[in-house]
Amino acid sequence: MQTPPTPARARRRWIPVLGLTLLSPVAAEYLIGYGDTIGRPKELLAGLLVLGPLYGTVAVLIREAVRRTGRGWPSMLLLGLAFGLIQAGIIDQSLFNDDYRDVPDWQETLRPTFVPGLGISAAMALNFLVGHMVWSFCAPVAVVEACVPRLADRPWLGRTGLIVLPLLYLAAAALIYQDHLRTEHFTAAPRASATAAVPAVCAGAAVKCSVRRWAW
């Protein structure tokens, strides 16, 4: 019978949780340097109050699901892809928007690889989905695990974390979605609904990954 972690051990596990929660949004939104808040430290720190729950909680939960079930990086990548599609296709709908937040070069980037039947740009879809999969989720997980090798293959969350983190994510996602509805004259409701099936397929594929075969 496995003994519960002592308070000291539990506190040690919250250090990488906090690190991943902060590193994920930094890698997702700040390192690329495209936002208008770059160079304004106070605004960047304030942004983490929303971006941390939006990206960081997902990174922690993806890692937790994979490590608890004994799976490896293929499952991690598939779950990262699933949440990347949720973020870009459903929450902020930038995947389908042809004039997102009046970004100056949005049209120039979108048109050369636009696929009319799908209503998306192939290049931007690749950028969003692979970008989220790698930079928002999997790369931060790899960095933080490398910093705590003794905890790298162990669960980090207890019951409280498994309840609180999903709630924080849902609150942040709802805030971003409401902001999208308020500021954008665009909604991709039918396509966003259809998009919801793809993350389910990715999650199913992540579960199907054999533990032994993919134990990297």
Image (cartoon, helix red, strand yellow):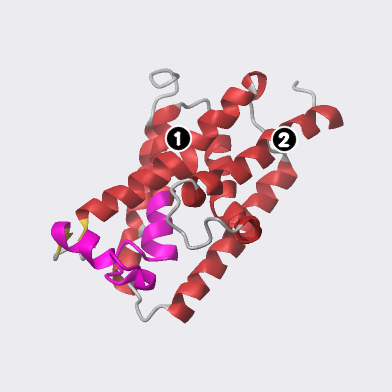
Classify mark 2: residues with Cα within 10 Å, few (<14), some (14-19) or many (20+).
some
Q: Nearer the viewer, residue 135 or 102?
A: 102
| Label 1 – label 2 distance at C-alpha | 21 Å
Horizontal and vertical percent position of residue 188: 32, 72
Q: Residue at x 53, y 61 (%)?
A: 37
With 190 as the anchor, is 162 left or right in this view?
A: right
Q: Residue at x 38, y 45 (%)?
A: 131
Q: According to the image, label 1 marks what residue?
A: 76
Q: Secondary structure at mark 2?
A: helix
On whether residue 109 falls in the magenta region, the answer is yes
Q: According to the image, label 2 marks what residue?
A: 15
With 169 as the anchor, is 199 left or right in this view?
A: left
For the residue marked with disc 2, what is the amino acid?
A: Ile
Residue 152 appears in view: no
- Which comes sooner in the sequence, label 1 or label 2? 2
**Residue reaching furthest right?**
7
**Residue reaching furthest front?**
39
Horizontal and vertical percent position of residue 191: 29, 67
Horizontal and vertical percent position of residue 108: 21, 63
- Position of the C terminus, as image quadrant, is top left
Q: Residue at x 79, y 23 (%)?
A: 3
Which region of the structure is painted magenta? 84-113
Find residue 119 and report its image quarter: bottom left
For the residue marked with disc 1, what is the amino acid?
A: Met
On whether residue 90 falls in the magenta region, the answer is yes
